Amino acid sequence: MTFRRGVLIVLEGVDRAGKSTQCARLVQALQQNGRRAEIIRFPDRTTQIGQLISSYLEKKSNLEDHTVHLLFSANRWELVPLIREKLEQGINLVVDRYAFSGVAFTSAKPGFSLDWCKQPDVGLPKPDLVMFLQLSPEVAAQRGQFGAERYEISSFQQTVQQRFEEIRNDTSINWKVIDASRSIEEVHTDIKSASEKTIDVAQHLPVGEL
Ligand code: T5A
Ligand code: NA
């Protein structure tokens, strides 16, 4: 039997698009189909770097904008050995936010170019599929009020939404836009089918780099 690596599947999207809900459902569905699958989320708030980020997001501390951008990236880099190991073991990884969130959120701040924001993540394992959960701000608002975290402000989120649109022009990435305004089950069906198709193809290919 030929060896098959795990594939790297990322879910991105605006706030409350249902990323965490769908990541959990996808891992469950892949496992039910007899595949090995695990979830990874960014920021990973459990590491020392992750704790600095978490405290910043909770507004318990302030960090300079370039510095926090590099910390979000470092938080991904510190998990790269684990990510590579899991993929080599044939474990499919479902990732809740990745470098694209990093670029979209920092470049929504004044004075940050998309190009500068992308640099620290160059060389990270490249996702085999990035699903962008699209949801209008109006529908997102119906899913509850913003919490107290740093970026949970409507005007900032609108800019983040625009940055994501620009980022999706990068044709070196395998993007799939998913209409996230439908029911959890309908969205899940699409995500599951796109993921199964990607696994069938990408498990035979080498892991790329951003
Ligand atoms: N950030 C992150 C950076 O600035 N740089 C970086 O490099 C990275 C990685 C982290 C913050 O850090 C920023 C971005 C963020 O501001 P987080 O911890 O990922 O944030 O964010 P959360 O607040 O946990 O997640 P979101 O608000 O984005 O929500 P999700 O995960 O998209 O949505 P989810 O699944 O939690 O669902 C939200 C609500 O909607 C309901 C759910 O039950 C839930 O109540 N829901 C639906 N309702 C109706 N129909 C559906 N289809 C639904 N799906 C879910
Ligand atoms: Na989430």
Image: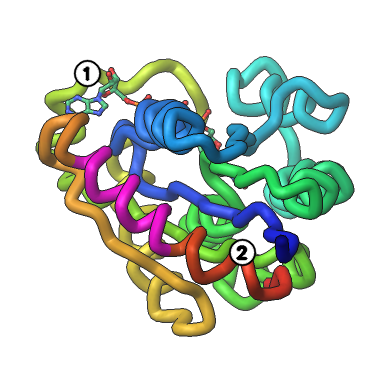
Examine the rendered structure and indicate whether residue 35 appears above or below residue 117: above
> Is residue 4 something one can see in this rendering?
yes
Q: Is residue 50 magenta?
A: no
Looking at the image, which is closer to me, 139 or 183? 183
Judged by depth in the image, the label closer to the viewer, 2 or 1, is 2
Q: Which residues are magenta?
A: 187-197
Question: Which residue type does callout 2 highlight?
Answer: Gln
**Which residue shows up at 68% across the image and 60% down it?**
4
Q: Secondary structure at mark 1?
A: loop
Percent coordinates x, y for residue 65 in the rendering: 68, 48
Residue 126 placement: quadrant: bottom right
Percent coordinates x, y for residue 170 in the rendering: 47, 80
Q: Which residue carries the number 1 mark?
A: 144
Q: Distance between the Cα atoms at labels 2 and 1?
A: 38 Å
Residue 152 placement: quadrant: top left
**Which residue shows up at 45% across the image and 83% down it?**
171
Q: Secondary structure at mark 2?
A: loop
Q: Mark 1, residues whose alpha carbon is within 10 Å: few (<14), some, or many (≥20)? A: few
Looking at the image, which is closer to me, 144 or 184? 184
Instruction: Indicate if the residue with disc 1 has its beta carbon within 8 Å of ligand 1.
Output: yes
Q: Mark 2, residues whose alpha carbon is within 10 Å: few (<14), some, or many (≥20)? A: some
Mark identifier at residue 203: 2
Q: Quadrant of the C terminus?
A: bottom right
Q: Quadrant of the N terminus?
A: bottom right
